[in-house]
């Protein structure tokens, strides 16, 4: 890489560290090109990105960001996985690591919080933001439906009583 390319890459990576919901750092030694492409495809489909970055450039890019605490994770052959949704990168990385033992998750960051490998693993088991929103809407909609049923019940009972009186009057 030329100097200008390196500057551009560091600037881009710095923006990634600032804007991402979560960043996962993993060691990828021994992964084939096909497996790496598979990981990238899965991450892209979920809404995230995987990048292989030179450790020195990644450490420079981390300076001045909230995620500066993960600098020591960049040793050896490392990659970063990131996404705006904080659950996507850990979930896809851990799912891929289950099927491929060559990918070793070292840790990561979620905002100013530094995560170790166990924290990334537990974060991967949590539901995504969309799933949480769906559950919350379901919980909010259920009481509203019950309230509407309870409020409508007396009105429907009154309507039946009036209908019964109307039939009684017609018969008389």
Image (cartoon, rainbow, N blue to C red):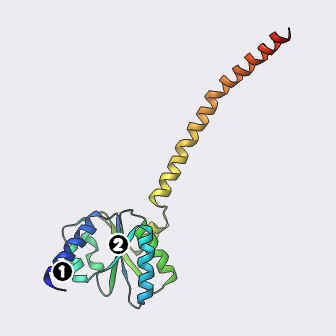
Q: Secondary structure at mark 2?
A: strand
Q: Nearer the viewer, mark 2 or mark 1?
A: 1
Between residue 40 and residue 121, name the one nearer to us: 40
Q: Earlier in the sequence, mark 2 or mark 1?
A: 1
Task: Estimate the spatial distance between the alpha carbons at disc 2 and disc 1, rounded to whole Å.
Answer: 23 Å
Report the residue marked by disc 2.
Answer: 108
Could one spot residue 118 in this view of the protein? no
Q: Residue at x 26, y 71 (%)?
A: 69
Report the residue marked by disc 1.
Answer: 6
Residue 27 position within the rendered picture, expressed as x and y whole percent measured from the top left: 37, 84
Dot 2, how many residues are within 10 Å of its Cα: few (below 14), some (14-19), or many (20+)?
A: many
Between residue 63 and residue 166, name the one nearer to us: 166
Residue 91 position within the rendered picture, expressed as x and y whole percent measured from the top left: 46, 70
Q: Residue at x 65, y 23 (%)?
A: 155
In the image, 107: left or right of 167?
left
Location of the C terminus (image quadrant): top right
Q: Secondary structure at mark 1?
A: helix
Residue found at the very far right of the displayed protein: 172
Could one spot residue 54 in this view of the protein? yes
Above or below for 165 versus 2: above
Above or below for 84 versus 74: above
Q: Quadrant of residue 36?
A: bottom left
């Amino acid at each position: 890489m030329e100097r200008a390319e390196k500057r551009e890459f560091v600037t881009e990576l710095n923006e990634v560290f600032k804007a991402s919901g979560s960043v996962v750092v993993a060691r990828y030694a021994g992964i084939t090109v096909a497996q790496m492409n598979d990981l990238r495809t899965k991450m892209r489909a979920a809404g995230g990105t995987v990048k292989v970055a030179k450790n020195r450039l990644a450490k420079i890019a981390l300076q001045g960001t909230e995620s500066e605490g993960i600098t020591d994770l960049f040793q050896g052959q490392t990659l970063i996985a990131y996404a705006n949704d904080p659950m996507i990168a850990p979930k896809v990385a851990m799912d891929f690591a289950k099927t491929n033992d060559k990918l070793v998750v070292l840790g990561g960051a979620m905002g100013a919080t530094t995560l170790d490998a166990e924290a990334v693993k537990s974060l991967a088991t949590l539901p995504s933001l969309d799933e949480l929103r769906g559950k919350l809407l379901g919980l909010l909609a259920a009481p509203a439906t019950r309230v509407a049923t309870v409020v409508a019940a007396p009105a429907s009972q009154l309507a039946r009583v009036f209908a019964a009186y109307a039939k009684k009057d017609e018969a008389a």
